[in-house]
Image: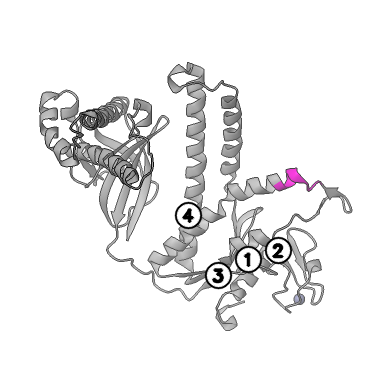
């Protein structure tokens, strides 16, 4: 099984400069190789230049230009040439099938953001200072760069990539795990209810709150996007300094929101997978289809209805996006798979209005968003906990397997 990892790296000022130069030189290598193919293609002989021919020239190019091209990893340069080759293969494939594709284009220095190292240990070394508590990645021509390794890498690192996003730098790894090591069985099963007030509620009465910082970052992102929208649409190289900074700000905040959401999802999923052999959750597709906007009563003033029109719906959608359930469930499923756990999606209909005690099902059982109060047997509980219990019971688990 191959897993991918992406970590923020913290280069020194000198290293950041070297990284920039590395991208620039790989970009010019890419464009130079593209130029060569272009010239050959336009020539009357319609010669086509192959990857092998260009790769064979690398040695000369490096020897001729030791200050620039000669500094970087041979393999990473091959990877860049291979990337160009892929673009050409796609181009010719589409020509052959009768389409009229655009000829592969030159890349501007701002549009060239990644350098790949096809093999760990060749021009790069993941965890180059293993005895130091700080993780580093060594990159040829750059040095040992600090890595913000927020989660462990499982398995053997196969490929290493360096990516620029706005002003930040990331290292992207792929690692191969020999075979997933199943976690020891715990004998525990759980149902989870995905909510907006809480990120999840579980069938044992536990809650995982929403990442609050996620909402703050989202608000900042919205403000930054508004600020950016005030600049006229102009070409990249015609932008003013303020305009460029506004673009960078948006990119940076986008990344931040995404990283925080992912981080929260990873942690939540890991905790669930460690504790339980079996996890049932609502099928989001069914749930989204059957959801409608219900009138909302003001909990402070009985009889007063809060607005529930388009704005409320947009707000709800906003927090749905914010909570990122889809992302979370994907992560949960993949973690469960490698740990030998079972995750099932169940039909969520009626899970919020059925009494777990007596089975009485009625809309009235849920007087408010948060409260469950059975009209038949009088049982009260948090509505999301009831939802989670019912989700668990809807899964293909025998009732007696559940301790409650
Ligand atoms: Zn009841």
- Residue shown at 58% from the left, 64% from the top: 283
Mark 3 or 4, nearer chain start: 3
Q: CA distance from mark 1 to mark 2?
A: 8 Å
Q: CA distance from mark 4 to mark 2?
A: 24 Å
Q: Which sits in the foreground, 112 or 21?
A: 112
SS state under label 2: strand
Q: Which sits in the foreground, 390 or 146?
A: 390
Q: CA distance from mark 3 to mark 4?
A: 17 Å
Q: CA distance from mark 1 to mark 4?
A: 19 Å
- Residue shown at 42% from the left, 31% from the top: 166
Span of residues in magenta = 307-313
Residue 70's spot in the image, x, y percent? Answer: 15, 29
Q: Which sits in the foreground, 322 or 40?
A: 40
Residue 217's spot in the image, x, y percent? Answer: 56, 38
Residue 208's spot in the image, x, y percent? Answer: 58, 56
Numbered badge on residue 263? none
Mark 1 or 2, nearer chain start: 1
SS state under label 1: loop
Mark 1 or 3, nearer chain start: 3
Q: Which residue is mark 3?
A: 190
Q: CA distance from mark 1 to mark 3?
A: 10 Å
Please say whether residue 220 is one of the residues in the magenta stretch. no
The C terminus is located in which quarter? bottom right
Q: Which sits in the foreground, 319 or 74?
A: 74
Q: Which residue is mark 4?
A: 267
Callout 2 environment at 10 Å: few (<14), some (14 to 19), or many (20+)? Answer: some
Q: Which residue is mark 2?
A: 382
Q: Which residue is mark 1?
A: 205
Whether tag 3 and tag 4 are in contact, CB under 8 A, the answer is no
């Amino acid at each position: 099984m191959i897993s991918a990892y992406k970590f923020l790296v913290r280069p020194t000022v000198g290293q950041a400069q070297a990284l920039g130069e590395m991208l620039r030189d790989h970009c010019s290598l890419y464009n130079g190789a593209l130029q060569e193919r272009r010239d050959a293609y336009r020539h009357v002989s319609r010669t086509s230049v192959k990857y092998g021919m260009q790769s064979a020239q690398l040695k000369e190019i490096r020897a001729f230009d030791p200050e620039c091209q000669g500094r970087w990893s041979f393999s990473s340069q091959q990877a860049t040439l291979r990337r160009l080759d892929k673009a050409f293969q796609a181009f010719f494939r589409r020509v052959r099938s009768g389409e009229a594709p655009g000829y592969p284009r030159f890349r501007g220095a701002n549009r060239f953001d990644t350098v790949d190292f096809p093999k760990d240990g060749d021009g790069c070394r993941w965890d180059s200072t293993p005895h130091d508590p700080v993780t580093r990645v060594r990159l040829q021509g750059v040095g040992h760069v600090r890595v913000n390794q927020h989660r462990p890498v499982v398995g053997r690192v196969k490929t290493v990539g360096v990516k620029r996003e706005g002003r930040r730098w990331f290292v992207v790894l792929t690692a191969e795990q020999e075979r997933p090591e199943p976690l020891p069985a715990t004998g525990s099963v759980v149902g989870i209810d995905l909510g907006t007030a809480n990120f999840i509620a579980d069938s044992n009465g536990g809650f995982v709150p929403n990442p609050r910082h996620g909402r703050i970052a989202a608000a900042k992102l919205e403000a930054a996007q508004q600020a950016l929208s005030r600049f006229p649409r102009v070409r990249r190289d015609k932008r003013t300094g303020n305009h460029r900074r506004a673009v960078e700000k948006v990119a940076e905040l986008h990344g931040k929101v995404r990283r925080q959401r992912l981080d929260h999802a990873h942690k939540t999923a890991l905790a669930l997978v460690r504790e339980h052999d079996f996890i049932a959750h609502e099928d989001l597709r069914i749930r989204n289809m059957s959801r409608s906007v219900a009138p909302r009563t003001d909990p402070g003033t009985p009889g007063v209805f809060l607005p529930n029109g388009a704005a409320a719906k947009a707000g709800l959608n906003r927090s749905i996006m914010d909570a990122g359930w889809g992302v979370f469930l994907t992560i949960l499923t993949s973690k469960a798979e490698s740990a030998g756990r079972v995750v099932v999606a169940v039909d969520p209909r009626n899970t919020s209005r059925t009494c777990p005690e007596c089975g009485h099902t009625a809309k009235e059982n849920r007087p408010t968003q948060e409260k469950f109060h059975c009209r038949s047997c009088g049982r009260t509980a948090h509505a999301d906990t009831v939802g989670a219990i019912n989700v668990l019971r809807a899964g293909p688990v025998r009732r007696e397997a559940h301790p409650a």
